[in-house]
Amino acid sequence: MLADVADLLLCPQCRAADVHGLALQGRTVRCPRGHSFDLAKQGYVNLLPGGVPRHADTAGMVAARERFLGSGAYAPIREAVRTAARQPSPDVSAGSLTMLEAGAGTGYYLAGCLTDRDRGLALDISPAAARRAARAHPRIGAVVADTWAGLPVRTGSIDVLLAVFAPRNPAEFARVLAPHGRALVVAPLPDHLAGLRSTLGLLDIEEDKEAHLLARMSGHLVAADSTDIRFTLRLTPAAVADLVGMGPNAFHRRSEQRAGAAEGPDPAAGAPSEVEVAVRLWEFTRA
Ligand SMILES: C[S@@+](CC[C@H](N)C(=O)[O-])C[C@H]1O[C@@H](n2cnc3c(N)ncnc32)[C@H](O)[C@@H]1O
Ligand SMILES: [Zn+2]
């Protein structure tokens, strides 16, 4: 619930609350200087200073993601993230963790990491995603926020930060982490879903993506460990359609259609029933 995490939040308008955090009074989140933000009826709060950008994930994309993840297809990734997140640390008191997921989507990975003693902050630029993340776990508070614009989160307040298939802001990730804090980043390897990509003409993963990731982290976060997660998925045509519909390809396909291009193949047509999942889980500490 938002009440569990309000004190971790910064006012997006004045950022004056870096010492005290925000306070939840009734259904309104307030900053010490008097700015206020109403909770949506689904329990999340929108802290975007401007409007919601057009590229935010839509309700349809979030529903596809929820169906796909709910089938357990990416459970091995969630298990690996959970194991890494819960590594014992002498700096964390009484085994209770404060976690943040940036670009949380439905909150699937964050919810998988939390116990009832922890608390989790799910940030996403999409209100549809925040709506879903707000009910992914009783100890999650969900906030609409833009990772690129800076996290509305107090400095040094987070034990474990997750960014799973999501945008990264290394300077901000380092700022919000506690001195002993760790950032767990999951990113696709070049051959992730390779068969599916070529069959359906989906967006490619750049070959130099990893070098790019490490270069951007440099000066903010240091790679302490990495683990590759590889397994084979057997997908029904409906699962293929959800996998396509939940990701950036949904935008790609829509913009092609807006531009009057040929609509292209049905996402599920001719898809292989087996695809290889290949991702890397990085563990970063503060530089
Ligand atoms: C590929 S999805 C991953 C979601 C979730 N981590 C998962 O793996 O199920 C990327 C997520 O990042 C969010 N996102 C995109 N740009 C963002 C930004 N600038 N700030 C915050 N979230 C963003 C999207 O709305 C989407 O939910
Ligand atoms: Zn304020």
Image (cartoon, rainbow, N blue to C red):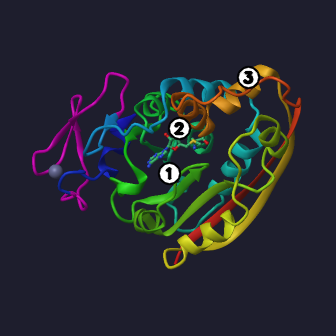
Which one is earlier in the sequence, the residue at label 2 or at label 3? 2
| Chief SS of the magenta region | loop
Q: Which residue is under mark 2? A: 105
Region in magenta: 15-44
Residue drawn 41% across and 62% down? Answer: 176
Label 2–label 3 contact, CB within 8 A: no
Which of the 4 quarters of the picture holds residue 115? Answer: top right
Using the image, tell me which numbered label, if any, was put on residue 254. Answer: none
Secondary element under disc 2, as helix, strand or loop, is: loop
The label nearer to you, 2 versus 3, is: 3
Residue type beneath disc 2? Gly
Q: Which residue is under mark 3? A: 266
Residue type beneath disc 3? Asp
The quadrant of the rendering that contains the N terminus is: top left
Residue drawn 24% across and 48% down? Answer: 22
> Residue 169 location in percent, x, y?
46, 61
Using the image, tell me which numbered label, if any, was put on residue 99. Answer: 1
Q: Is residue 109 above or below residue 216?
A: above
Which one is earlier in the sequence, the residue at label 2 or at label 1? 1
> Residue 14 location in percent, x, y?
17, 56
